[in-house]
Image (cartoon, rainbow, N blue to C red):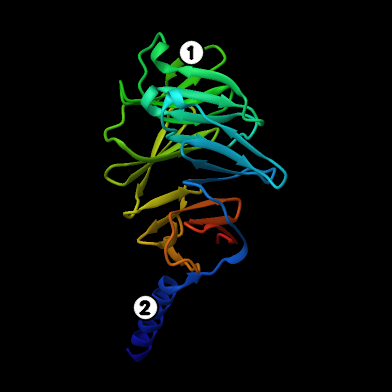
Amino acid sequence: MKKLVLLLFIASFSVVSSQNQKLTPLKIDSIRFDGDAFLGYDSFGFYYTLKNNVFSKIGTQETLEYKNISLGRITKVDLQNPLKIVLFYENFNTVILLDNQLNETQKINFSESTIPIVATAIGIASQNQLWVYNSMNQQLGFFDYLNKEYKTVSVPFTESIKNYSSDFNVFHWVDNKNNWYVCDIFGKIKSKGIIPDFDSIVIINDNQFIYSKDAVLIFEDLEKGKKTEIEISEKTFKKFYYKDQILSIFTLAGITNYKITIP
């Protein structure tokens, strides 16, 4: 009996210890800049910002800018392909494609489509396509921007989208009840579970994500059932960004970059 009690005590202590573990990233550098939003880096070392609705690409030797006053506010920027950057102007139902010099290569006005489209979520996909969530039918589809053709791939969503992200092959979203779903290019939808309440979130893959709540950063792995606080020196921040083991914290003073190893 004493051995059983001892084993139970050790097991409970291990659970508490694992829950209290913290992840401490290594600070790399800090960048001061004057902007409204930090959008991320590309593989060539440029970083991207928004200020007064002007989209900027900033490097050590040059700064490039793009602005389009007639289309209103930029609501989403997709940087997955730095040679084909996607700017989404939701209020005007329009997407602008830019090359790596921020030259406009294509303007897509979904209101001119033969199929009624009111886009509320956009992301670049494979094979010259864009992910498009069409609020007209509450379904996800692909828009071929070379042939200007649209096809629906998913069943209707049951709830509105609270947060979303995508890559070339999958589209992730969290609905207004904090349910997390992922849709592949064939329209197959998987439920990933319920996300804790968050202020900001970055989905890493099908099982891992980082979210912030009240200026606390948490890494969570649903597959392993692990939740770990990420310790950073900033007590407050506007937003964070994560890509390829680099965690960027955006504050009023600028950007602080950390090297972080995701377990």
Who comes first in sequence, dot 2 or dot 1? 2
User: Mark 2 falls on what kind of element?
Assistant: helix
Q: Is residue 250 left or right of residue 73?
A: right
Find the distance from the CA under tag 2 to the CA under tag 1. Answer: 57 Å
The residue at 41%/82% (across/down) is 10
Quick one: which residue is furthest to the top in this view? Answer: 114
Q: Is residue 243 left or right of residue 210?
A: right
Q: Which residue is mark 2?
A: 12
The residue type indicated by label 1 comes to Glu
Q: Do the residues under discs 2 and 1 have CB atoms within 8 angstroms? A: no
The residue type indicated by label 2 comes to Ser
Residue 92, percent from left and from top: 39, 23
In the picture, the disc for residue 149 is 1
User: Mark 1 falls on what kind of element?
Assistant: strand
| Whether residue 78 is situated above or below residue 192 in the rendered picture | above
Q: Is residue 227 left or right of residue 261?
A: left
Q: Is residue 240 left or right of residue 194?
A: right
Residue 91, percent from left and from top: 36, 26
* The one of 143 and 84 positioned closer to us in this rendering: 84
* The one of 194 and 43 positioned closer to us in this rendering: 43
Quick one: which residue is furthest to the bottom in this view? Answer: 2
| Whether residue 154 is situated above or below residue 261 in the rendered picture | above
Classify residue 159 by image quadrant. top left
The residue at 45%/16% (across/down) is 150
* The one of 136 and 9 positioned closer to us in this rendering: 136
Select label 2 or label 1 by which is in front.
1
Residue 123, percent from left and from top: 49, 31
Q: Quadrant of the C terminus?
A: bottom right
Residue 209, percent from left and from top: 46, 52
The residue at 28%/42% (across/down) is 176
